[in-house]
Image (tube, rainbow, N blue to C red):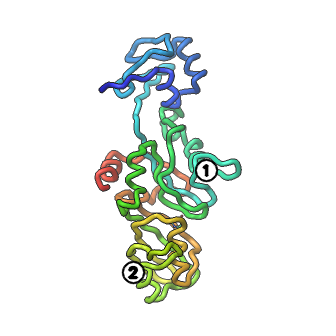
Amino acid sequence: MIMFMRIDRLLCEMNIGTRKEVKELIKKGQISIDGAVIHKPDLHVDEKNVKVTCQGKEYVYRPYVYYMLNKPSGVITATADKHDKTVLDLMKDQLEDLTGGSGAGIPLQDIFPVGRLDKDTVGLLLLTNDGDLAHNLLSPKKHVSKTYFVRTDQPLTDDGIRCLEEGVLIGEGEKTRPARVAWQGGNECRITITEGKYHQIKRMFHAVGTTVIYLKRLSMGSLVLDEELLEGQIRELTKKEVMDLCSGI
Ligand code: URA
């Protein structure tokens, strides 16, 4: 079934302007649909198959968008907050870069972070408006793997590593699911878990007598943090990354 959407709503969803601003653009004849200037904000269009031109610049509507953020410390995983900078604020800051200069075309209001990293955790965070993908990645039934780099206040013992791998009690009744730990020397390791409980890594390491002093997420499912991305930077996922992520769950 073809779904039609009001053109003023579509332009808002594409972040071209507020409802008021896009109505004004339409009134001034600055919007074209498939090459023809339009004058009515209540015109209905097939949003998946329409070429929008605004002030001479072409935009393509993409119902789903996917971004990778290398989350820095000090930023919270939320869409809005009164006190702290959020991951969505970082996205707004980089809108111009992400859209090749226009600042429009991304349905910003619908984008949310998939899962949560603590304020002091850095690394891979997926931002999207694809609710189904997010639901699948976060579903406790799917056991999507997540790999973290961890630095602790003291070296892990062999016994500590074995406990982490077999599962530890973190105050939730049941032990954590089996994990994989790769010791990296000194106080550093990589750990792969298949759950996403609140403060899970910090609580697991606490359960074996250590404190996490640095935590970085390296991967989620098939998606691997692009090490070229500086902390705070965002880039769009490649088509292959999106396909692998969607087909891997
Ligand atoms: N586990 C934690 O303890 N914190 C995070 O941010 C992510 C996983």
Q: Which amino acid does label 2 sit on?
A: Glu
Is 91 placed above or below 21 here?
below
Report the mark closest to the observer, 1 or 2: 2
The C terminus lies in quadrant: bottom left
Residue under label 1: 86
| Mark 1 / mark 2, whichever is N-terminal | 1
Q: Residue 69 at what x, y percent from top left?
A: 50, 52
Q: Is mark 2 on a helix, strand or loop?
A: helix
Residue under label 2: 166
Q: What residue type is labelled 1?
A: Thr
Quarter of the figure with residue 181: bottom left
Is 15 placed above or below 34 here?
below
Residue at horizontal 65%, vertical 48%? 81
Residue at horizontal 44%, vertical 74%? 176
Q: Which residue lies furthest to the right in this view?
A: 83
Q: Residues within 10 Å of mark 1 (few under 14, many from 20)?
A: many
Q: What element carries label 1?
A: loop
Q: Which one is in front, 135 or 62? A: 135
Circle 1/circle 2 CB separation < 8 Å:
no
Q: In this view, does 202 lie to the left or right of 74?
A: left
